[in-house]
Image (cartoon, grey):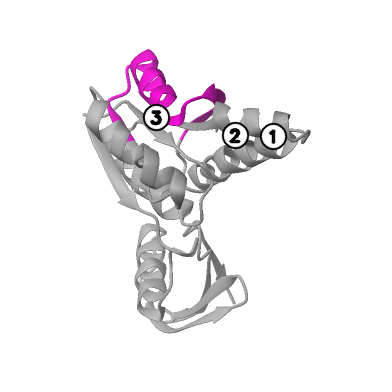
Amino acid sequence: MYDRILLPTDGSTGTAHVALQAIDLANQYGATIHALHVIDTDMRSVLTEVGSGFDTLEQRGENAVGTVERLGQSHGIEVETEIRNGDPAETILAVADELDADLIVCGTHGRSGVRRQLLGSVAERVVRHASQPVLTVQLPETDVTVETEQQARELASEALEEDGYDAEVTNAERQLNVWVVDAETDDRTLLVYLDPQTRRTSIIER
């Protein structure tokens, strides 16, 4: 159903949630994700007028698509990255047509304030004018995608089952930037380390 999924990203907080939606679909259908960041030409012009360089805009773009690429790698999904200059909505629509994308997945509320009130959100314009189906995902206020102990337990149980362990999860605890989940089989004790952003797991026997 889907071969190429276009994932525009501006690096907003909550990007991981949006990327994981695209990754789940890519995993189901064997699709490739094309992560796109558009440097707004209006913003570039403003920085030129005030005498600022736009290295920060370029770096923000690299960080944005790099986050998606890293998430894709964590889940075994191929991710292509691209940075372009232009009007964000128009560029997203143009790239979608160039790629012959089957689906566009984009976050909402990536921008706020006066600019959004005057022009409307980028996602809204993409939904209105895209010739492809568009899946919009509301951006939460955090990049953490595993927020509760119950989520950590369920993901750890899935990882254990996929690796062939007949194990029971006994405890899950958030420690700094990782969930540590304890599990037991009939003859051994296991630790499952779970990344709260990427959901990547590592299982260790002890």
**Residue 197 placement, left or right of 176:** left
Tell us which disc is closer to us: 3 or 1. 1
| Element class at badge 1 | helix
Residue 111 seen anywhere in this rendered image of the structure: no
Task: Report the amino acid beneath label 2.
Answer: Met
Instruction: Name the spot of residue 128 as percent of width and height, x first.
Output: 23, 31
The CA span between labels 3 and 1 is 20 Å
The residue at which mark 3 appears reads as 89
Residue found at the far bottom of this picture: 170
The CA span between labels 3 and 2 is 14 Å
Residue 105 seen anywhere in this rendered image of the structure: yes
**Residue 58 placement, left or right of 77:** right
Residue at 46% of width from left, 56% of height from top?
A: 14
Q: Earlier in the sequence, mark 3 or mark 2?
A: 2
Residue found at the far top of this picture: 98
| Element class at badge 3 | helix
Q: Residues within 10 Å of mark 1 (few under 14, many from 20)?
A: some
**Residue 86 placement, left or right of 56:** left
Task: Report the amino acid beneath label 1.
Answer: Leu
**Labelled disc at residue 43:** 2
Placement of the N terminus among the 4 image quadrants: top left
**Residue 62 placement, left or right of 21:** right
Residue at 51% of width from left, 42% of height from top?
A: 10
Residue at 26% of width from left, 41% of height from top?
A: 135
Instruction: Name the spot of residue 160 as percent of width and height, x first.
Output: 41, 66
| Total numbered circles | 3
Task: Report the amino acid beneath label 3.
Answer: Ala
**Labelled disc at residue 47:** 1
Q: Is residue 148 above or below residue 22?
A: below
